[in-house]
Each structure stands twice: as structure tokens, then as C-alpha cells.
Image (cartoon, grey):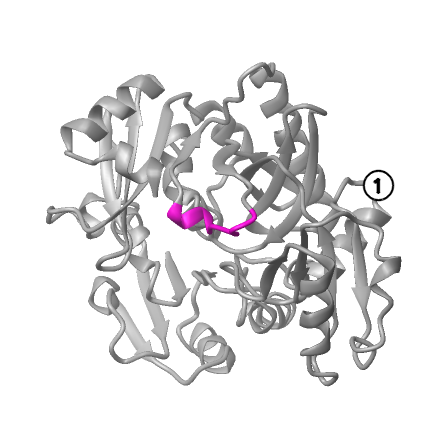
Amino acid sequence: MKLLFVGARLFDDVALYAKQKGLETILTESNPMARNLELADKHYLVPRGMTDPMDIAIKEDVDAVVPLMGIDGPLLEVAKMKEKLEEDHDIPVVASGVFATSIARDKLRTKEFLLEKGIKTPKFHKIIPGTSRNINTETVDTNFPVVLKQPEGQGGSGVEIISSRVDLDNRLENLSDSMEEIFLEEFLQGIEVSIEVLRWEGSSVPLVPVYKGETTVEGIHPLNKIKKAPLDVDGVDNRKNNRDIQNLASEIAELVGIEGTADIDIIFNAETKENNIIEINNRPSGTRYITAASTGLNPLHELVDMGAGCWNPENVQKRLKDFAGLEIPVGKLESDRNNYKFRNFSGEESWIVHGPENYERVTIRGRTMRKTFEIAESLKINLEKLKNE
């Protein structure tokens, strides 16, 4: 069986797994300096866009295409390629279609969709292009601080936290009237949670809710925080709460029509026990390593199984484990294990290191959360220093 993978950056997460399954791998990439090209059986350097990958999929007569896009920009082109290959050439593409992608890539449209479906999301106020200088901020139905967002962007880009009405007035005054639609969103004090959900051929499997820290007015990105899984909140029935989050993730995946994998971002209020949906990201998630540590399932490996035609949701449910996972930003760890040969967790206690140079993270699996911290200490990771930064 032959699979085409689009995008080299994440290919090292699946290369060894695909080889172990006896799959022939073809890789397309637009950057000639990209890493991981040599890990595929064959690779093509192509211009940006999906025209060439689509032509190669047809020429090579592949059994499926597995896009490995960790950024939002190309996803709509991927979705259009999916429709063309599946309808005209009967080649499955393990990614979401145009409808799901058009909702997920636009934060404003995401919120409008959620409201339409009766799913809780923070209150928001849309600002129409050309009116930013004249908006009556007295009518904004929210308290400060507020979050100013652009519909597109990821990794915190296009997001600002505004602390006062004066700051908001000044910020809106400086906006270009030619800017695309923006919106204000209420700032919610709570816990940031992500959950990945797998969905293929009409069946969904939600994975583990991941704790990404408290919301902050400084807008600290989750990549710079310590993450833990499963979600464990003091004074809360965590088994029930996590099950509620999983059911909500499945519901959203079904409503939107996600295919492959998606990451759903939530703010959980421990006092009211409410889950507010912030974003839907229909691409491989930054939580995939801690998800793999905690559940025993690597989400990207599941995409390979979908492409290979051997993904079975009942089997996935049976394989889910209940480990503790801990992920720590370390900057640089003195180790030679940051490569594809060491990307899989083994046994009940293990760890991996991943991420670009000087921005590395260590993800640990343990029988208990206490054990993960003991492993971190054995690696000489200064957890107290991280907590104080």
C-alpha cells in the first residue's frame, strides 16, 4: 500500500510507524531545506499549494493522501484537493472538507456556528470593516479586560488583551479601516483545556482533555506553560467533567463534519462548571505528544491508519490507556533523543523530547502524576524556576 504525505515538518512523527506497517511512503514538500525528506521512500520538491501534490497523488496511483499541516494557511487548499481527489479519482484524503475548514479557520464564523447550534462560547461583539473609528464602545456588552481578535491567525497571532476602555478606544482608533473584520470577546477567568478528537467515515473518538494552565491577562501562550493530562481540577468530579468534555468534543466534530483530527480549545470555569468553546482547529495539534503520553495513542499514527484503511473506532477505544502525562518547556535539554527514532513512548514510564532547537519540550508518561514529576526531577528540569517565570 502506498501513501502520499504532504508536508515534511511533521513527517518524522509518522515515518517509523509507516515503515513498521509496511507502507510505501511518498512525501511532497515546498522547502528544499526541510528536514525529514530522507525519511520517506520517495520525495518530491514542489511549489507551494496543492496542485502538484494532487498531480503526484494521481501519477503515483497512491491509495490515500495524508496531509501533515500544522498551520492553518494551506488548509482550505487541502480541503479543495480532498474534494477533487475523492470525487474524481477515488483517492481518500485524511483531512476535513471545505465546509468544516471554512468554519474552523475563521474564529468569528466558528463562534457564530457554535451559537447557532446552542453551544456555549464567550460573548463577542463584531466590528465591521470601515466602522472601527466610529464604533460606540459604550455599547460593548462585556467587562474589561476584553480580547481583541482577528478571524484568522494561530499561535496567539491576531489576539490582544485590552485592559481598559481607554486602551480599547485608542486601539480601535489606530486600526486600518481596510482591515478585515475583527471582534471583541469577553475575557474569561478559568482553565485552558484542549482536547483532540479523531473522526473518520462518520465515527468519532474523543481523546483526553489536556490542562494548559490558567487564563492570564498577559496572554501567555500555552506552549510556554506546563501542561498536564488528564485534566484534574480541585473540587471537581474530574471523571464526570472529562467525560462531559469528551462528549462535547464529539458533538462538535459531528456538527462541523471534521475528518482526520481536530483540536478543540475550551475555557473551563471551575466555579460554574461551564465549558466555553474558544476555537476549533482541524489540523494536527500541539497537544499530540501529551495526548500520546496519557492515552497510549499517537494521533498522527491514527491518521496513517485512516489512510491505510485499517482504522477501527471500536479498536481505538479498546486501546486507550489511562496514564498521567506532563509536558514541560525546557528551551534546550542536553540529549540526543530529539529525532524520529525516539518519538514513541514505551511502557508505563518514559519520556520524549521534541520541538525546534532552543524551543524544546519534554513530554513524560508516568503511572501517576507524582511519578511524572519524579522523572522530570531525574532529568534535572528546574520545575520551580518554570513555575516562577
Quadrant assignment for the C terminus: top left
Q: Residue at x 41, y 29 (%)?
A: 295
Magenta residue check for 221: yes
In this rendering, would 115 be left or right of 67?
right
Front residue of 137/85: it is: 137
Q: Which residue is drawn at 41% across and 23% down?
A: 321
Quadrant assignment for the N terminus: bottom left
Magenta residue check for 127: no
**Segment tinted magenta in the rendering:** 217-224
| Above-or-below relation of 67 to 141 | below
Which amino acid type is marked by label 1?
Gly
Majority secondary structure in the magenta region: loop
Estimate the x, y position of residue 283 in percent, counting from the top left.
52, 56
Kindly tell me whether residue 99 is visible in this rendering: no
Front residue of 59/199: it is: 199
Estimate the x, y position of residue 361 in percent, counting from the top left.
28, 46
In this rendering, would 308 be left or right of 19?
right
Estimate the x, y position of residue 294 in percent, counting from the top left.
39, 29
Q: Give SS at disc 1.
A: loop
| Above-or-below relation of 150 to 282 | below
| Above-or-below relation of 315 to 147 | above
In this rendering, would 39 be left or right of 279?
left
- Would you name the residue on which mark 1 appears? 118
Estimate the x, y position of residue 159 in percent, counting from the top left.
59, 61
Q: Mark 1 packing: few (<14 Cα in 10 Å), some, or many (20+)?
A: few
Q: Which image quadrant for residue 240?
A: top right
Q: Residue at x 62, y 40 (%)?
A: 266
